Structures are given as C-alpha cells and as structure tokens.
C-alpha cells in the first residue's frame, strides 16, 4: 500500500502499540475538522487502502476538498472491514460463491481463489415462522418446524462454513442479524494482526440486509447492499460510490414523558422522507445526543432504509463506550475505541464545532408524541390521538373503490376455541412484538412488559381473535425480562417467545386460524396488524391483512387488548377490570422512572457475556446436521438449493454489448413500487407458477415454506418475481398480483409465463415505473429475478439507491425518464415496442424509441443510471459476479 501523505503512525493505548493512519497528517493542507464524522471514516479508509489503482491520491484529495453544497461527482472506492449476511439474502450469496467455484474450474482457474478475503458473518434469523403462538412450548414447536423445513439450506450453510475461509455462521435460534451485530460482532474499532504489527482502524461493513444500519447507532459506518455487491466486497472488490451528500440532523432537548424511541424514529422517518434523503448520508449531532441512549440511537439508525438514506450515523462518545461496557465488551476494546476516536478527531464532545453539512434538519425531542405509522408505509406517521380518524378515512377510501359499495359496519361471525365472536373492519388479528427496530431497545421492551404486568393485574386479556407473538432480537432480551419479572405477564397476554428471528416484519407471521381467515375473506374485511417492526408494505405482513401499522412494543400490547385499531386509545377504554370499571391506556402506561429503574437494576454485562459465550456453536440439532465435504459443492437434487445458470457459456472475455431492439413491456407500474412488490417474499400460493413448479416436483403445499427460504433456488424465485398479491400491473387492468398481457396474442397470463414465451422468441423486455422504484429491503432477487425473466431495461422516474445498483450488478440497464416526465406524460401505454440507443460508448443519455401498435413513434432521451466507471465495467461483463470471476480466472491462469 502507498503512504503518500505520511499518515501511517502509531497509537499507544495503555502500553500497547497499534499501527494507524492518522487524519491529522492532512491538516497542514486541508481543513479536516470541518468534515462530518462519517466522511472522516471514509477518509481513513482511503488513506489506509491507497494503492494507486483502486484508491488514488485524487480520491483522497477529492474527499478532503468535499464541498457540502455541490452535487456529488467524485467517485471513491470504499473497502469495508467486514461483511454481514442474513440467511434469506445470505444463502443465495453463498450459492453464487459455490457456483463461481464451479465456473472457475470450468475456466481453468483455481476454485480455492473463490473465498471471502475479508471477514464475513452470516446470521440465520429469517427462517423461523410463527406457526405456533400463545403457548409455553411455541418456541420449541416453531424451532422444530424451522429445522424440518430448512434442513437442506442449513446443511448447505454448514458446508459453506467449512469450505470457505474467513466465513462464520451464527446458527438459528440465536437472534436477528442486526442485534447480534450491535451486541456482539461490532468492534467500533477493528484490529488486524499483520507481520508489520497490529493495525487499528474504524469498524466498517456492508451487509445483505438493509437494516445493517442499526450499528450506525454505535458509530460504525455501514449500510445494506444487495447480495451481489456483498459478494464482490467479500472477494476484495471495492464498493464504488460517489462522494455523498451528508444531511446533518440536529437534535435538541429530550423525550417527554410518555414518548418512546419508536415514536421518535417514526417522527424522524416522516421528516426525512419529506426532506428527501435517498442516496445520502444522514448524520445526527447536537446536544440532544446527551439525552439519547445508545439503544435509541440504534433504533434511529436501523430505520435509515425507511427514510431512504444510505446510512443514519451517530458519532462515538461516552454513550458509545458505556454501551460497549454494558454489553460485555472487554476493557481493552473499550480503551482502544476511546483512544482511537480521540486521536482521529472522531470523538463527540458537547458544544464542539459543528461539521459542514449539505443541509441541516432540526428536531426538538420534547415535541415527539406517541405515534403509529401506516397502514401501508413506514413513513406515514399518525399521532396516536389521530389514529382512529385516520383508519376511518382509510376504510372509507378503500370501500369507496369497491364496486359493491361495501358496508363499513359489516361484521362476520367467527368461532375460535369453541367461542363465537363478531369480526369487523379494523379488528386487530396480528399483534407482534417483532423485528429489529425495537427488539434491540430495552426501554421499549421493558415498557411492553410493564404494560402487560399492569393490564394482567387488572384482569385485562388480549382479544381472542388476535394472534399475539414475541420474537426477541437476541437471547439477552428474555433473560432480562425474566429477571425483571416481566416475562410471565407478557405470556399471560399471549406474548410468549415464538422464536429468535425477524418473523412478522418480513412476512413470516405464519397462518391465521382457518376460521379467522375464512371469516376475513367471507366478509372481505379490512382487518389490521400491529407490529413493532420496520415495514408494513402492502402484502408483506400477511395476505389476509390489508391494514398494517408500526407501533412501539407497549402499544402493540395495548392494541392486542383493545382488539381493534378503530378506537381512540387516548380516550376510549381498553376494557374493564375485574370489578367492571373501565381501564384506560394512561392507567397502565409506565413512567420513564419505572423503566429506567428496571434497566439499571436488572440488565448487566454478565447477561451479554453468558448469552454470547458460545454464539457460533448452536443447538445439538444444528451440530448434528450431516455436513457435505469438499471444496466444490456437490449439488443435490434439492428444491431449496440449485446451481444457478448465471455463468453458463461464459468465456474469459466479455462479449460486445448488443443493441436492444423491439423490446416488449412486461410490467408497467406507478410510484413507490418496493422490492417487496418485485422480489418474491412471504407465502407461496399453490396456484402460482412457483407453487405449480414445486407440486410438479412432489412438494406438497404444506411443505412449501416461504419464498425467502427458497432463495437458493432460482427456479422458484424467477417464478415469484413480480408476484406480490398487491402488485397492480397496468398491463393487466382490474387484476392484482402476477398478471400481464402477452401482446402478440393479447392474452392475459402470468408474468412468468409471458416472460418465458417472450424469451422463446428472443424478445427483450422492459419495465416502466414511476417514482421511488425499488424502495425497501436490499433484495438482490429483485434484480436477479428481473434479469432471469429476460428484462434488459427498466425505465423509471427515480430509483432507490440499492436496487438501482443491483440492477446494474446483474446486467440490467436502469434508465430514468427526462426530468418532469413519466410514462403518462409521454403517452406510453406499455403496448409499444421499445428500441434503445447504443450503450457501447458509456453515454449519459440514450434515445428511447417507442412504436405504438398503429405505427406512431414516440421518442425521448432517457438518462442512463449507470453512475460510475466501475459500474460500466460490471455492465459490460454482464454483471458484477462475471467481472470478478473473469478477473480471478485470468490472474489464476497467468500465475499457473
């Protein structure tokens, strides 16, 4: 590595010497102190990784001269210290690595070159489903089913753990990736032993889950990428990026009594979505941080994908080291973190000089009020006092769109456990304390336990039609709740632990009782889910539940008791106590002092150390799984894991880019199409193309598992692409789900079947879309499935950052309509044939020529969203994996 600025130096921490790259070596030439905290981390990365090829002095000086107000134009190469994966997105990443070993062998190279070069950890957390709930043995029963369903995948991951170096697997039943990352994996300052000494540098990462950003609360810079980019990072490829705009979010004051971290994060999400921060860094600063516990910071950082930012980072300060100590980190690590942060100007002091920011947004924490968000998007915050009116308005709007002018008072009789109940619009059928936003935060979980304790003491119970569940983010959570005497009251209200995983928030809510589902469908009822998760996009939580709301864990408990969102929790009673007296939310809501006292007295570092002592060991069931051997994976006859076709017929040199002519539109959609709409997720329907494929192979519907669990099988995933039950493809009017029109015959058919018919005719395909295309989870299958269906081009008004790069990473061209234009304004119906101008010369714009069925030509200039020179290299090679594989194969042959 180069050292053009003589930045390499040493740092003494209580007698131990560390090699570091000092930022103050640049102070004679540049005003480094004005840089935001996040950019200082990137600057250190450039100094340490300078090699004259991937990282140059020009990149370093561009960052040093960063203009907060200028439009991003300078490209840099970021090389993270590590990679984190979860099993839904991690399994296909490992599948791709295994396939790359096969391809490397075919190309005459050394398969063992395909290995993570930087540490990679995969946490199995997305596979457990809520099949059983409300009973003491729910966790055991769900875990057994999880292993039965996923044995093939788990065997494959155990093979990967043995076959690949630098790759660890956190077994199922441990916790969710974000919380394990926060509580255990993250170092804040990373160290690496070399022949030249022990190097210390900021802990940075990319992850195959968008909620990688939870560790931003700890001062760790990282964000979610698609599995494609993560694989490249593991294989030593830099993450190329434009120097970002950095939005400063200034916090003042402190949260008022009654408000929670969830209320705060929903407020922040609403503010930043309105501000517009897609593709930007958000950095929190201000004296309000003095009153913001690290768990609250992590909650805010975790929601970065919901407010659209690349990251939502907090600086390192005394609260950071307090959390490290409280979560069981060793004293040497804590001392290094403080000493390093101070030496590099990365330590926050109250009243210190403010950095330069592109824009500054402010929030007085004292103005935050209890809130929920929904019924379809996490950024749609509703003050709790307005929740009933908001649902009423939503219900009226939904019913008005129905042809039969449905009755808002309609009710249906349902029998549950021998009792008859009346079910109506707005009734809560799912109440879940779940997912990463809140299950890392002791304050809101203790609050939920206290609400349950007070409610149970008064004789209140959850309503019989509510499916209640509790999926903690780590095993530490039930340990401290049990120590505080709060697990039993939660269980008394049906919130037994159902698993250690993401569950409801990712669509693994499991089935509702048959009679309940039948009643919902019979009455065509708009029923509700209330969850303490991140996301409530359409069709995500449960196919029968159309209105879904994000809420704090204590509010989840309260709504389970109320049994409906069609009520005002601020003024209406939740029910009656043992003496028949009404009980209101204020009667059971805990004070901040009650919550604080339990946290201080019942949670300690020993709990964390005990739970993480054998984090990679797993249960006996995990350890007893038979594990395949060998450097090359022997692909079994599996419906879970299959060798993908990405590298078939691939040579050592890329072919020339071919023109796109006479393409047909496969899908035409409007604004805010998420990766949930595109990428397969949730349950697999028996009559869907994926369901029919599995049944043809002898898999019964009860054994389908979820799309997420079958991400290692491209045959299932391509059949489920664009198959979300709430997708409204304008090419198939009057339908929802996986439908389109096959234009050569005018026939309405499934998107998969139409795509395969177009593929047999060698007809390329396009997708037309509106604003914010690809928001949501960082799902590489949203790009992989799109490519496998034969889509060559997507034309949208705007893109979400991760999905745009994923499209490029799989050889699909993202084009952008001219500013202020869209499909409607240009008169495009989707019936046209599309031809795209030449892409060989890396143009910034291309001409799109659309010809209507009657021969009318509509031409427009579209912006090419292949944003960096490196992305053009990926595109020319057919994708990022092909680029990496060719490079390794050529080097391997040259060395042989």
Image (spheres, rainbow, N blue to C red):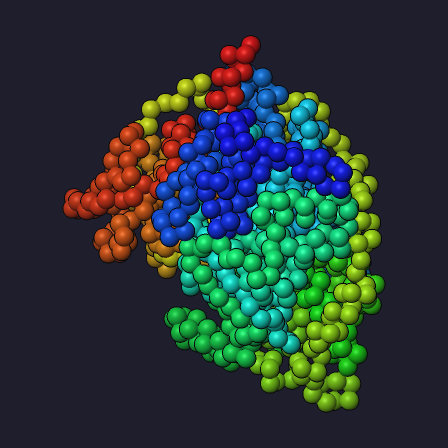
Q: Closest to the observer: 600 or 461?
A: 600
Q: Closest to the observer: 238 or 462?
A: 238
Question: Is 740 located above or below residue 453 in the figure?
Answer: above
Query: Residue 396's x, y, as percent?
Result: 44, 76
Question: Is 153 located above or below residue 565 in the figure?
Answer: above
Is residue 180 visible to the viewer in this orientation of the structure?
no
Quarter where residue 110 is shown: top right
Q: Which residue is found at the position 61% from the left and 42% from the top? A: 202
Is residue 760 visible to the viewer in this orientation of the structure?
yes
Question: Quadrant location of the N terminus?
Answer: top right
Question: Quadrant location of the C terminus?
Answer: top right
Q: Which residue is found at the position 22% from the left and 46% from the top? A: 860
Query: Residue 791's x, y, as percent?
Result: 38, 39
303 sits to left or right of 672:
right
Q: Which residue is found at the position 58% from the left and 66% from the top? A: 288
Q: Residue furthest front?
A: 28
Query: Residue 805's x, y, as percent?
Result: 44, 41
268 sits to left or right of 668:
right
């Amino acid at each position: 590595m180069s050292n053009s600025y003589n930045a390499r130096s040493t740092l003494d921490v209580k007698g131990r010497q560390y090699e570091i790259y000092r930022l103050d070596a640049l102070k004679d030439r540049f005003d480094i102190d004005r840089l935001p905290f996040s950019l200082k981390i990137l600057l250190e990365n450039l100094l340490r990784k300078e090699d004259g090829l991937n990282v140059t002095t020009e990149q370093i000086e561009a960052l040093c001269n960063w203009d907060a107000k200028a439009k991003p134009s300078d490209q840099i190469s970021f090389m993270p210290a590590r990679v984190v994966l979860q099993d839904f997105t991690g399994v296909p990443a490992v599948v791709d690595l295994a396939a790359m070993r096969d391809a490397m062998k075919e190309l005459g190279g050394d398969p063992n070159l395909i290995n993570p070069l930087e540490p990679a950890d995969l946490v199995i957390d997305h596979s457990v489903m809520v099949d059983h709930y409300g009973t003491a043995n729910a966790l055991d029963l769900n875990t057994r089913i999880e292993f039965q369903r996923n044995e093939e995948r788990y065997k494959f991951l155990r093979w990967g753990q043995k076959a690949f170096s630098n790759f660890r697997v956190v077994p199922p039943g441990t916790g969710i990736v974000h919380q394990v990352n926060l509580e255990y994996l993250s170092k804040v300052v990373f160290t690496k032993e070399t022949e030249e000494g022990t190097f210390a540098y900021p802990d940075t990462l990319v992850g195959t889950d968008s909620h990688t950003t939870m560790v931003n609360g700890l001062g760790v810079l990282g964000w979610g990428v698609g599995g494609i980019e993560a694989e490249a990072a593991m294989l030593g490829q830099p993450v190329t990026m434009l120097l970002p705009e950095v939005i400063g979010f200034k916090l003042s004051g402190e949260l008022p009594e009654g408000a929670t971290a969830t209320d705060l994060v929903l407020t922040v999400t609403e503010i930043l979505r309105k501000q517009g921060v897609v593709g930007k860094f958000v950095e929190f600063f201000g004296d309000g941080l003095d009153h913001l516990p690290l768990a609250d910071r992590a909650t805010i950082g975790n929601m970065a994908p919901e407010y659209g930012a690349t990251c939502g980072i907090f600086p390192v300060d005394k609260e950071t080291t307090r959390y490290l100590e409280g979560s069981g980190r060793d004293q040497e690590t804590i001392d290094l973190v403080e000493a390093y942060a101070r030496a590099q100007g990365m330590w926050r002091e109250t009243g210190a000089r403010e950095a330069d920011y592109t824009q500054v947004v402010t929030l007085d924490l004292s103005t935050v009020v209890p809130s929920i968000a929904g019924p379809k998007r996490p950024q749609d915050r509703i003050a709790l006092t307005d929740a009933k009116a908001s649902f009423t308005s939503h219900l009226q709007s939904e019913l008005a769109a129905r042809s039969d002018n449905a009755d808002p008072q309609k009710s249906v009789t349902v029998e549950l456990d021998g009792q008859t109940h009346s079910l109506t619009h707005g009734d809560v059928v799912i109440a879940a304390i779940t997912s990463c936003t809140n299950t890392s935060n002791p304050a809101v979980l203790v609050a939920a336990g206290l609400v349950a304790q007070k409610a149970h003491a008064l004789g209140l119970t959850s309503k019989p039609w509510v499916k209640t569940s509790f999926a903690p983010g780590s095993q530490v959570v039930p340990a401290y709740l049990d120590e505080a005497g709060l697990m039993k009251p939660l269980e008394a209200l049906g919130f037994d632990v159902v698993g250690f995983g993401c569950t409801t928030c990712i669509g693994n809510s499991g089935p509702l009782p048959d009679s309940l589902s039948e009643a919902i469908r019979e009455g065509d009822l708009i029923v509700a889910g209330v969850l303490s998760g991140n996301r409530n996009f359409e069709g995500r939580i449960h196919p029968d539940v159309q209105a879904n709301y994000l809420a704090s864990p204590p509010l989840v408990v309260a709504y389970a008791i109320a049994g409906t969102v069609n009520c005002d929790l601020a003024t209406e009673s939740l029910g009656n106590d043992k003496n028949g007296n009404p009980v209101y939310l204020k009667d059971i809501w805990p004070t901040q002092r009650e919550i604080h006292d339990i946290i201080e007295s019942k949670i300690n570092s020993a709990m964390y150390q005990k739970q993480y002592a054998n984090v990679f060991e797993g249960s006996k069931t995990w350890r007893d799984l038979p594990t395949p051997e060998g450097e090359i994976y022997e692909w079994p006859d599996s419906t879970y894991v299959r060798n993908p076709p990405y590298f078939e017929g691939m040579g050592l040199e890329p072919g020339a880019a071919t023109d796109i002519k006479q393409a047909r539109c496969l899908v035409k959609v409007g604004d805010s199409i998420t990766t949930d709409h595109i990428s397969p997720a949730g349950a697999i329907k028996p009559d869907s193309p994926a369901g029919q494929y599995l049944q043809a192979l002898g898999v019964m519907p009860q054994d389908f598992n979820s799309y997420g669990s079958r991400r290692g099988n491209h045959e299932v995933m391509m059949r489920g692409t664009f198959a979300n039950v709430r997708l409204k493809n304008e090419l198939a009017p009057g339908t929802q789900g996986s439908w389109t029109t096959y234009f050569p015959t005018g026939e309405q058919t499934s998107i998969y079947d139409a795509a395969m018919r177009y593929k047999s005719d060698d007809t390329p395909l396009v997708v037309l879309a509106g604003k914010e295309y690809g928001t949501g989870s960082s799902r590489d299958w949203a790009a992989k499935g799109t490519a496998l269906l034969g889509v060559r081009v997507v034309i949208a008004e705007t893109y979400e950052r991760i999905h745009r790069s994923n499209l490029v990473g799989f050889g699909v061209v993202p084009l952008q309509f001219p500013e202020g234009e869209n499909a409607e304004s240009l008169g495009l119906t989707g019936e046209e044939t599309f031809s795209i101008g030449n892409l060989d010369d890396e143009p910034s714009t291309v001409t799109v020529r659309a010809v209507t069925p009657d021969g009318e030509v509509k031409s427009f200039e579209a912006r090419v969203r292949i944003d960096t020179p490196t992305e053009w290299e990926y595109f020319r090679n057919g994708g990022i994996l092909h680029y990496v594989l060719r490079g390794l194969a050529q080097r391997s042959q040259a060395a042989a």
